[in-house]
Amino acid sequence: IPGSENRKNPKWVTFLKCLPFGVRFSLYYLALFLSTSLLVIALALIYFNIEGNDRENFESDDLKSQATSDLTSSNFNFQLLKPADGTTGSSNGILNSEEGTTLHAEQLTRDEFQPAMKDLFKDRDLSPENVEDIFGNISSSDKLNTGHSTFGREVIYIYHSHSREAFLPYLKKTDQPEDAYHSKANITLVGEMLGKSLERRGLGTTVNSTDIVQELDSKGLDYGSSYAVSGEHVKTAQKENSELEIFLDIHRDSLRKDSTTIELNEEGYARLLFVVGTGHKEFEKNLAFTEDLHQQLEIEYPGLSKGILEKDSSQGNGVYNQNLSPNSVIVEIGGVDNTVEELHRTVEALAAVLSDYYWHEKK
């Protein structure tokens, strides 16, 4: 290039020219290595920055999804608890008399306790001490004139797989659901109350008030074996009395009062929830039987029944001894906070519907 001979080279170029070839060659590769390393580091920083943003977005979306799910669940429970006006839900899993009566376990948030066996033997003091008498005396002994009778034949069998489920208003020094267990003042008193109500309507009823927890303990079994033990009682009853037609496993829910109570005719009632196990081949017969009861309750006591909760073997026992009879179901009557008065009103309503079903609907 003309005139280039007069142009001065930068000092670092002049310096490099003075170095031996081998040194210049090494510096060249060192520079190449350093520039490549810097490029890799820059790309890595860009990658992790992008990934971090994606993770934050994902976590944000996940929290939003969870919040939406919680809101949906909250709305679901709220709508279920409203006194019915002909509609108790919608197609998103909430009950609707036109669309069906079945809930699914994943759609209904319910806290179910599985107490340790040792905790079931820690009886709390009762308040008042004569709770058993209060439950026993509230049922009227007057026979209703229904015009029907089984004339001594016992056709309904009541039992309690979780026999020590109790009610917090009658236990001292606790308001926690996990403490609501007692050896005497428990759900078996509600079952006996229901038996009396059915007898008053001419329906011969057997009430099995066996302390299943005590039996589990004597056999070295844990609480998870409750249905297996109660099922043996059902089988024995069937062998001894072939005329038994309806089998009711009575429980109380572990949810709090706002989810287990409803006001009808200006009086408080303990709400009902039916549980049908779908873990056996003939469960649809149990479901049909239970749907009949629920629909009749909707007509006569709108909103008293929260509906039917289906549970398969991945969500619990899944069978609940309902494979032993097509007319078998779990009935949860109220929850840990309900009073004997609320329980009694519901028991009378359920007995009335069972009586109507037996005399007029059963095929």
Image: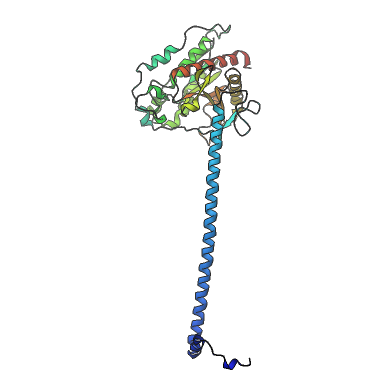
Give residue 214's quadrant in the image: top left
Q: Quadrant of the N terminus?
A: bottom right
Horizontally, residue 171 falls left or right of residue 237, namely left
The total of numbered circles placed on residues is 0
What residue is shown at x 55% (from left), y 55% (from top)? 54
Is residue 282 visible from the viewing direction of this image?
A: no
Which colour style is shown? rainbow
Residue 206: image location, x then y, percent:
49, 15
Residue 216, given in percent of the width and then of the height, sits at 40, 28
On screen, residue 218 versus residue 201, left or right, reads left
Would you place residue 158 above or below residue 54 in this image?
A: above
Percent from the top left, x then y, of residue 285? 61, 25
Can residue 134 be seen at all in this image of the molecule? yes
Pinpoint residue 324: horizontal percent, then vertical percent. 54, 24
In the image as oriented, which residue stretches furthest toward the right?
98
Q: Is residue 350 above or below residue 177?
A: above
The front one of 2 and 200 is 2
- Where is 13 relative to 132, above or below? below
The residue lying at 52 percent from left, 74 percent from top is 35
Identify the residue shown where x is 49% and y is 25%: 260
| Quadrant assignment for the C terminus | top right
Residue situated in front as seen by the camera: 87 or 151: 87
